[in-house]
Amino acid sequence: MSATLAAAAAGDMQSTWFRHASVRTMTHAWRDRGRDFDWRFSVEMKPLLGHAAIAELPLPVRKFINVQAFHKYLHDVCLTETDVVNPVAAAIAYGRSAAVLPGAMAAEAFSIMVDEAFHSYVARLFSLHIAEVTGIESVQMPSRNALLCAYEDVGRGLPPRIVAMAELLCCCLSESNFTKEILVASRLEGYDPAFREIMVDHLAEGAPLWLLPPRPHPVLVRAIRGTPV
């Protein structure tokens, strides 16, 4: 793969980022609605909330459980973006990853770090907003989620280069799956519109970068294999 083609690929990613990055376009829709908030969390995203045993609980208890589902989901967004994705993106940017990319493409990893840090910021702000308008603050959340634990399990006992490769591939796969989940959330009707709009904004720049085609970009493939790009 020539340096010219690699630079062209980086230019495509850069153009996509400047068109879609929510850090440049997000309007914080929930701020325009004051204290108007629908506390029901999506049953499609957390089916347990639709169980008959939950439906039979008193309204204040059901509200508490649903609001905690919001807090937990938003907390997991923060952890995934800052503690899973951004370390991998930083490794790519500084040439410490299993994929050693050409300079122009490696620089684009910084745009991912900006997006993911902003997603964490928005998720935390929205969680604080929910606590304010419902009067229900988040219970103490864990410092690690299931994805972080899985990363540690995958890398245990492996050589450093294999660990780096596993982290890169697992990051791409987990972000792809997470983006598909956000796609579902962005299409949900009948729930709080501000939450859906946040998911739409999140999806805007996430889909072009993480919903990988059946044949990943050859520059990335060659970099992972350790062959010249």
Image: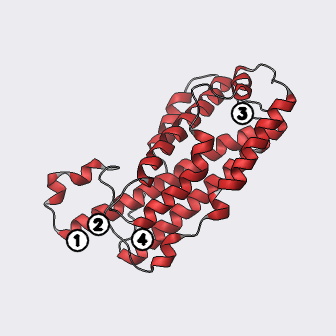
Q: CA distance from mark 1 to mark 3?
A: 48 Å
Q: Quadrant of residue 135?
A: bottom left
What label does residue 64 carry, if any? 2
Residue 207 in view of the camera: yes
Q: Which residue is mark 4?
A: 130
Q: Which residue is mark 1?
A: 60
**In this rendering, would 121 be left or right of 134?**
right
Q: Nearer the viewer, mark 4 or mark 3?
A: 4
Where in the figure is residue 186, as x and y percent of width and height? 45, 54
Q: CA distance from mark 1 to mark 2?
A: 6 Å
Q: Are marks 1 and 2 in contact (CB under 8 Å)?
A: yes
Image coloring type? secondary structure
Q: Give the amino acid at mark 4.
A: Ile
**Residue 88 or residue 10, whichever sits in front:** 10
Q: Give the amino acid at mark 2.
A: Phe
Which of the two labelled residues, at mark 4 and mark 2, occupies the earlier sequence position? Answer: 2
Q: Give the amino acid at mark 1.
A: Pro
Which of the two labelled residues, at mark 4 and mark 3, occupies the earlier sequence position? Answer: 3
Whether 24 is drawn above or below 19: the answer is below
Q: Which residue is mark 3?
A: 97
Residue at 50% x, 53% y is: 77
Say few, some or many: other residues with alpha carbon within 10 Å of mark 4 (under 14 / 14 to 19 / 20 or more).
Answer: many
- Local SS, label 3: loop
Which of the two labelled residues, at mark 2 and mark 3, occupies the earlier sequence position? Answer: 2
Whether 93 is drawn above or below 141: the answer is above
**In this rendering, would 215 be left or right of 96?**
left
